[in-house]
Image: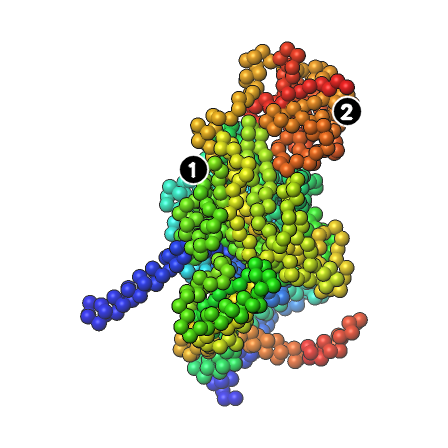
């Protein structure tokens, strides 16, 4: 090597290492990087048939995400409101790119399998929608089309997807991930997962699709094989709300196998995240599941995949419920399959998503391309376009905007989800956070040192109750903040509970002395104009909060929810633009929000033992308890009001079992009572609203939201005890026929 | 237009090729495969059938399969000719779309523009400078006041803070002043896009107008008000062609291809007089535009 060349090499090397250093740790206290976890391009079969003018591929998706103008699938120009920091394009793996290849004269599909290619070619005589339905049916009937499964064909598309991701990757500025969607849809129930790979060094030749298997356990097994081969990946479950109770099961999995420690561990190893909001609704909770949450009635989507009729079941479909079941399983079985963090996404099929109410251009190609279509009551596959909403965003706290750092952030669950706005949210849990901590401008450093960030587990207790720092800053281009809430869930004797605390809010509002609730912030939305003003709310909210009801013997989780003041929903804005009356039956305003990943508390074995003695079904049997048969059950309850005491909460429910197979809760502790905390039993939304019941096979079966709950009653002497099927073998009730 | 330039013109290519194509077609039709009322299955056609069969099935056809292919070809030829005689091709959208597509493919292949010259690129860059603009850069410091916290005192607090910050020998660290936020207190050499990501659009828009080297305020943002000192400002520039040559060449080629294709269509449409009937109030305007 000549001297001058060597000098040049050295200069280049040192420049590289300097740049490398600058890039590797530019944010020692981590920065919130906003990105997209869920988007489809025309390489997804369904998105292809929804694209008329522009067949956007992954290239267009990346261009749009980094701020360039692209075409909407129906032809007009669209541009993102603010460029993203990172994105994973998640096209459906099933026959991915088949249409694209069939329409490319030079493609391997055309050369190797011309018959199939011809069938899928545009203008070849077959209507693309028919072609799509044929392909979709071949998947659901488990008779895949071999030409499209040919590893050479599928491998070509996947390699192209990975290459494009690499091409657009600019470490430090714009991060792309190799990713795809595993589209498992047993009986039209949504079991979908998005798969993200840490890097592209050792990605597989072809992705594992739902044609290979629609059982998540098989997906996890495949991911573990990948990991052994040095290819790190994680899965993000999404649209629990459309899963009809399958996404977060409590007792048995898809194949009827009981959920146990190994199932839970495998799920947690592979699926650290779940999507809480996207265009097709939110999966946090519903007014039915959380009747005491006044903000639960938000973007609740009632729809089943492929337009099946009926309403999806809510138990097993929503995240807050899953968190509660998770801590209950931790208490009773020592495992928790639902210790996952939160992300949001779009699920747009346009290769581009709108994240704001004021630039919403739909998400299903030609089906909702114009304001007229979006506001119309016409349905596509049973979906009402008016119930669709802009995309959610995911923030990852990471040291740098690159694949490694962001992926580690996702694995650590140091993520939070928003409804699309860029609220900045810090959330830490610890034992000795001081009220004055926030006065110090270097508090973030101290918080990392003295506690755990969102997604973490509280360290063993060092004081009477855990303390939390929550700091939220508004999106500078969106509305002011209304309040910060802590959603707490805990479990006791197989039952789980939830409670919402208002912890920081704008203005001088005073919490209600009885309920602790802070009154509504008000509303500045001008319905006639479709506008709002930031004259209420606050730009910044922060607090150090101590759990006032902490019990160190109980498993618990805490997550933060931040709400903006009410702003116009897209349907109001677009109806105004068309000079129309906004459609009825859809909210005109919305409170945009952010949800942090939770922080969990798990008691030590010593702390756990300090709980009061409990009764299990096994205890009852040992003490000579006899299970009532159908006739005895009928005699005990039918046509009568019985008093049922929940020994965990001490509450007494008066339940009237009618002759007509309906039961009515007449009161709690003798009165119609709304309590601040909600258990998984007989919850207060049932008050006054009858539910169906049936006595059969020695069980009293009550149907809540389409889900059956079984009660077994045992008699010891002249006392009656009851156990519910969803309380993990605990007998938590005493039953007393009421004598009036 | 000189002959060499003319030879570069895509339209000329197209017309030449079209003429050849046409002549060839005529020749083949009349000479080999039969005039009206005659169908000749040539040796070339038979080989053609054989190759496409082999490509699909990965083996040559058996003699009886070959007979079948030829029989089928004759049937297709008879029915296709009769269909065309009846004009059935004219109203079929699929056939029309396919023909249009074939035309567009040909046009696309023919209109590959030549390598742009240096002058062409320079002119292109000058005409589309906004597309290649290097964003301006700002280095600034900021101190934030939260209106919700300050309430009625906001105006006074702003004035006092500004005065303190601009004191000639200020010793206090500006990062300790104002209300605490997660916002960074200074940014160096940042583009408007980077700044807007943290401070929003409203704040970013105002930076251009601020004086250099001293504290100024209030600058409003979605959060509240800020005192800002712009330390340095690099205006947006049009980069030298040499540094973005490839990018400009790509854009030039894209645009040239689009223009050529459009011109192509324009030339063809000249052969027609388009009349638009019907209810559209725009009929006349539309016809004028097309013509």
**Nearer to me, A543 or B133:** A543
- The quarter of the rendered structure image containing the C terminus of chain B is bottom right
Describe residue A65's horizontal placement relative to residue B272 as left or right. left
Please tell me if label 2 and label 1 are on a single chain.
Answer: yes
Res. B203 in view: no
The 10 Å Cα crowd at callout 1, few under 14, some 14 to 19, many 20 or more, is: few
Q: Secondary structure at mark 2?
A: loop
Q: Quadrant of residue B231?
A: bottom left
- Residue ID for mark 1: A462
Q: Quadrant of residue B37?
A: bottom right
The numbered dot on residue A658 is: 2
Res. A468 in view: yes
**Nearer to me, A359 or A366:** A359
Where residue B2 appears, x then y in whole percent? 50, 88
| N-terminal-most mark, 2 or 1 | 1
Please tell me which residue is depicted at 60% across the width and 39% down the height of the picture.
Answer: A499
Please tell me which residue is depicted at 59% across the width and 34% down the height of the picture.
Answer: A497
Q: Quadrant of residue A401?
A: bottom left
Please tell me which residue is depicted at 32% across the width and 63% down the height of the picture.
Answer: A18
């Amino acid at each position: 090597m000549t001297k001058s060349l060597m000098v040049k090499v050295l200069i280049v090397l040192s420049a590289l290492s300097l740049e490398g250093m600058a890039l590797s740790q530019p944010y020692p206290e981590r920065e919130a990087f906003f990105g997209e976890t869920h988007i489809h391009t025309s390489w997804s079969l369904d998105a292809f048939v929804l694209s008329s003018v522009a067949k956007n591929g992954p290239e267009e998706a990346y261009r749009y995400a980094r701020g360039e103008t692209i075409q909407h699938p129906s032809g007009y120009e669209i541009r993102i409101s603010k460029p993203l920091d990172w994105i994973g394009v998640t096209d459906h793996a099933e026959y991915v790119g088949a249409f694209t290849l069939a329409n490319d004269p030079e493609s391997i599909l055309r050369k190797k399998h011309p018959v199939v290619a011809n069938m899928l070619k545009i203008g070849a005589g077959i209507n693309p929608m028919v072609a799509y339905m044929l392909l979709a049916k071949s998947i659901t009937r488990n008779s895949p089309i071999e030409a499209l499964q040919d590893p050479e064909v599928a491998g070509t598309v996947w390699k192209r997807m990975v290459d494009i991701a690499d091409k657009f990757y600019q470490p430090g500025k714009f991060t792309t991930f190799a990713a795809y969607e595993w589209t498992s849809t047993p009986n039209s129930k949504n079991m979908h997962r998005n798969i993200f790979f840490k890097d592209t060094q050792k990605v597989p030749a072809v992705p594992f699709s739902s044609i290979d298997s629609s059982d998540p356990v098989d997906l996890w097994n495949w991911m573990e094989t990948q990991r052994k081969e040095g290819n790190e990946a994680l899965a993000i479950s999404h649209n629990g709300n459309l899963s009809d109770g399958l996404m977060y099961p409590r007792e048995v999995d898809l194949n009827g196998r009981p959920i146990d420690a190994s199932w839970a561990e495998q799920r947690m190893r592979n699926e650290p995240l779940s999507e809480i909001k996207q265009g097709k609704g939110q999966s946090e909770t519903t007014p039915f599941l959380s009747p005491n949450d006044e903000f639960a009635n938000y973007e609740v989507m009632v729809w089943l995949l492929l337009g099946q009729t009926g309403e999806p079941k809510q138990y097993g479909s929503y995240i807050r419920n899953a968190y509660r079941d998770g801590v209950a399983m931790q208490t009773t079985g020592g495992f928790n399959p639902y210790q996952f963090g939160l992300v949001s996404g779009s699920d747009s099929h346009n290769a581009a998503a709108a994240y704001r109410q004021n630039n919403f251009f739909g998400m299903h190609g030609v089906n909702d391309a114009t304001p007229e279509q979006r506001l119309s009551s016409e349905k596509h596959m049973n979906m009402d376009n008016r119930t669709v909403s802009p995309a959610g965003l995911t923030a990852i706290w990471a040291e740098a905007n690159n694949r490694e750092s962001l992926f580690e952030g996702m694995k650590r669950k140091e993520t939070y989800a928003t409804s699309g706005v860029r609220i900045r949210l810090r959330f830490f849990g610890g034992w000795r956070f001081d009220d004055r901590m926030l006065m110090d401008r270097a508090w973030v450093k101290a918080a990392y040192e003295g506690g755990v960030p969102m997604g973490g587990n509280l360290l063993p207790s060092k004081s009477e109750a855990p303390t939390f720092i929550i700091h939220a800053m508004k999106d500078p281009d969106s509305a002011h903040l209304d309040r910060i809430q802590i959603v707490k869930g805990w479990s006791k004797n197989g039952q789980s509970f939830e409670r919402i605390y208002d912890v920081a809010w704008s203005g001088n509002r005073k919490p209600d002395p009885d309920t602790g609730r802070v009154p509504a912030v008000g509303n500045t939305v001008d319905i006639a104009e479709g506008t709002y003003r930031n004259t209420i709310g606050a730009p910044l909210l922060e607090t150090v909060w101590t759990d006032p009801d902490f019990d160190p013997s109980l498993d618990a989780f805490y997550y933060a929810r931040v709400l903006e003041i009410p702003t116009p929903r897209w349907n109001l804005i677009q109806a105004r633009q068309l000079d129309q009356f906004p459609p009825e039956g859809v909210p005109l305003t919305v409170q945009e929000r952010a949800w942090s990943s939770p922080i969990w508390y798990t008691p030590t074995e010593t702390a756990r033992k300090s709980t009061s003695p409990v009764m299990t079904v096994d205890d009852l049997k040992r003490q000579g308890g006899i299970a009532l048969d159908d006739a005895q059950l009928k005699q005990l309850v039918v046509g009568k009001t019985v008093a049922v005491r929940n020994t965990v909460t001490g509450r007494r429910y008066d339940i009237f079992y009618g002759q007509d197979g309906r039961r009515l809760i007449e009161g709690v502790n003798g009165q119609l009572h709304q309590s601040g905390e909600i258990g998984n039993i007989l919850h207060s939304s049932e008050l006054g609203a009858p539910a169906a019941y049936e006595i059969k096979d020695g069980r009293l079966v009550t149907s809540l939201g389409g889900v059956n709950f079984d009660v077994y009653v045992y008699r010891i002497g002249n006392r009656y005890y009851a156990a519910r099927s969803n309380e993990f073998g605990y007998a938590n009730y005493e039953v007393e026929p009421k004598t009036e | 237009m000189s002959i060499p330039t003319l030879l570069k013109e895509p339209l000329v290519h197209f017309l030449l090729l079209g003429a050849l194509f046409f002549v060839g077609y005529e020749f083949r039709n009349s000479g080999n495969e039969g005039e009206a009322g005659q169908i000749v299955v040539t040796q070339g056609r038979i080989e053609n059938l054989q190759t496409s069969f082999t490509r699909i099935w990965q083996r040559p056809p058996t003699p009886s399969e070959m007979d079948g292919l030829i029989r089928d070809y004759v049937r297709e030829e008879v029915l296709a000719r009769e269909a065309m005689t009846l004009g059935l091709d004219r109203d079929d959208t699929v056939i029309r779309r396919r023909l249009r597509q074939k035309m567009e493919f040909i046009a696309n292949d023919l209109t590959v523009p030549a390598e742009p010259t240096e002058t062409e690129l320079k002119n292109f860059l000058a005409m589309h400078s906004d597309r290649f603009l290097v964003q301006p850069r700002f280095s600034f410091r900021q101190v934030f006041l939260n209106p919700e916290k300050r309430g009625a005192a906001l105006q006074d607090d702003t004035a006092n803070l500004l005065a303190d910050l601009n004191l000639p020998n200020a010793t206090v660290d500006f990062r300790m002043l104002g209300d605490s936020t997660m916002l960074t207190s200074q940014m160096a050499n940042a583009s408007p896009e980077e700044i807007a990501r943290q401070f929003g659009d409203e704040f970013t828009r105002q930076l251009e107008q601020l004086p250099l080297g001293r504290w100024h305020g209030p600058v409003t943002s979605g959060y509240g008000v800020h005192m800002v000192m712009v330390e340095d400002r690099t205006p947006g520039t049009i980069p030298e062609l040499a540094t973005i040559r490839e990018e400009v060449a790509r854009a030039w080629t894209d645009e040239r291809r689009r223009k050529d294709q459009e011109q192509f269509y324009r030339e063809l449409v000249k052969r027609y007089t388009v009349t638009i009937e019907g209810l559209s109030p725009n009929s006349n305007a539309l016809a004028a535009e097309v013509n």
